[in-house]
Amino acid sequence: MARYEITGGNALCGEVTISGAKNAAVAILPAAILVGGKCRVENVPDISDVRILLEILRDLGVDVACPEPGVVELDSTEIKSTTPNPELVRKMRASYYLMGALLSRFGQANVALPGGCNFASRPIDQHIKGFRALGANVEEADDYVNLTSDPETLCGHRVSLDVVSVGATVNIMLAATLLPGQTVIENAAKEPHIVDLANFLNTMGARISGAGTDTVKIKGVEQLFGGTYAIIPDQIEAGTYLAAVAATGGDVLVKNVIPKHMDCITSKLAEMGAEITNFDDAIRVRSSGRLHDTTVKTRPYPGFPTDMQAQICVCMSLAKGVSRLTESVYETRFFGYCTELQSMGAEILINGKTAMITGCERLRGAEVTARDLRAGAALIIAGLAAEGVTTVRNIHFVERGYENIIQKLTALGAQIRRLDD
Ligand code: EPZ
């Protein structure tokens, strides 16, 4: 398996351009199934989750072209199957969005349960609740979800989610788009990628309102037409680079961001002593590398994102004083990386949903293993800040969600290289 070798101690300086948002791209690309014709999607990140998804779509009969870097053209006129390739589906998490998209277009789908980061039990009961509310028959058997329906019964409906779920909100939006009648999703997730999906679908002719609030309304339409859409920048990729500069010290202009999406992250880094300056589509971060403690509680958007838990934990492990980090979305997420950070000298005490982190002067390089996407990103930040050499194994997790991470970090002065076993 490939690994990264990092020699820590360099401050990060210069400019980095953020790629398109992974969690928007993996929702928008399956949505192309709903478009009876060609659509062009721009600012698509070149990451393994996207490459796998495009392979799944090609296998279903979607005509997929990549005319230039970051651009994908899709034509779903000739789809020939409603059973995505299970081996590919199991390689990532967001493949379950194919359920909603295929159900909406064809009234049926037979999709294997997804794979992806397993830092917690990740049920899909709310997705299924939504499909059933729209009139679909849903059977779960042998690690498959089989959706069937009678054309007369599939129609819009009210769905009140029992838990704020990004995935369920996305899947129900996709399922409802081409159904007759109106669907109202209550207690919906409000993440930027939910709004991005709604904007993509509306560009293609859908009638979705309320995305970004806790109530999303979808007025079903007969069909969607082609069009062009550019994906928003990745809030979590941007947050990861901001946290890296805060931890290592330095002065970096993070370009191609939407500062509003970053508020929850930049305010916390500023509390810890980083100097943050917002521009229209960029953020400048400066840090001495010596931070001070703070308290963070992860929350659904617009709160501090759970996907930044591991990265801020590294900053806390280098901050003067004792920080508190409480996880309210995935309770077991700490276990993906804290042991590894402790092997680098971090002082972390986990008690249920809360970790107490006592900052130290320097972390020390070590051999560590990534167990999920964001854990891997955090271990890279730790290696950049540590004294000596750090080897991060299982970096395929990282390459699922960070485009050109070696090139981007090297350009900022990091000493990092990729080694294949
Ligand atoms: C999305 O996962 C993201 N993935 C995750 O990012 C992110 O951590 C998560 O949202 C929260 O923001 C993608 O967008 C592809 P949820 P998702 O449904 O949709 C519970 C990354 O690093 N729940 O919002 O799976 C669930 O257990 C990845 O980019 C149910 O109980 O998350 C969790 O406690 C990791 N039943 C909470 O809701 C359901 O049917 C939030 O999960 C669905 C979810």
Image: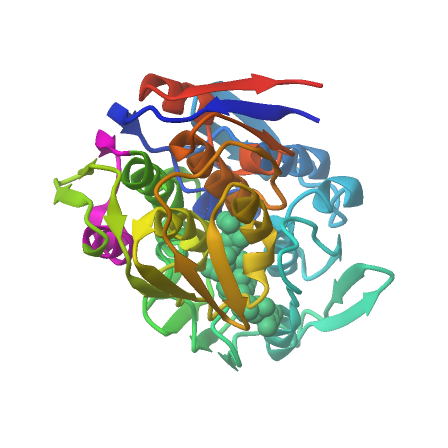
On-image quarter of the C terminus: top right
Q: Which residue is nearer to you in this view: 187 or 151?
A: 187
Q: Is residue 103 magenta?
A: no
Q: Is residue 137 above or below residue 121?
A: below
Residue located at (82% from left, 59% from top) = 143
On-image quarter of the N terminus: top right
Q: Is residue 177 visible?
A: no
Q: Locate residue 402, reporting x and y percent.
A: 47, 34
Q: Locate residue 97, reporting x and y percent.
A: 59, 54
Q: Locate residue 324, reporting x and y percent.
A: 38, 65
Q: Which residues fall within the magenta stretch? A: 249-270
Q: Is residue 65 above or below residue 156?
A: above
Left/right placement of residue 398 relative to residue 255 reads: right
Q: Residue furthest right?
A: 142
Q: Which quarter of the picture shows residue 152?
A: bottom right
Q: Is residue 258 magenta?
A: yes
Which quarter holds ligand 1? bottom right
Left/right placement of residue 18 relative to residue 49 reads: left
Q: Locate residue 35, reporting x and y percent.
A: 51, 46
Q: Which residue is nearer to you in this view: 297 or 263?
A: 297
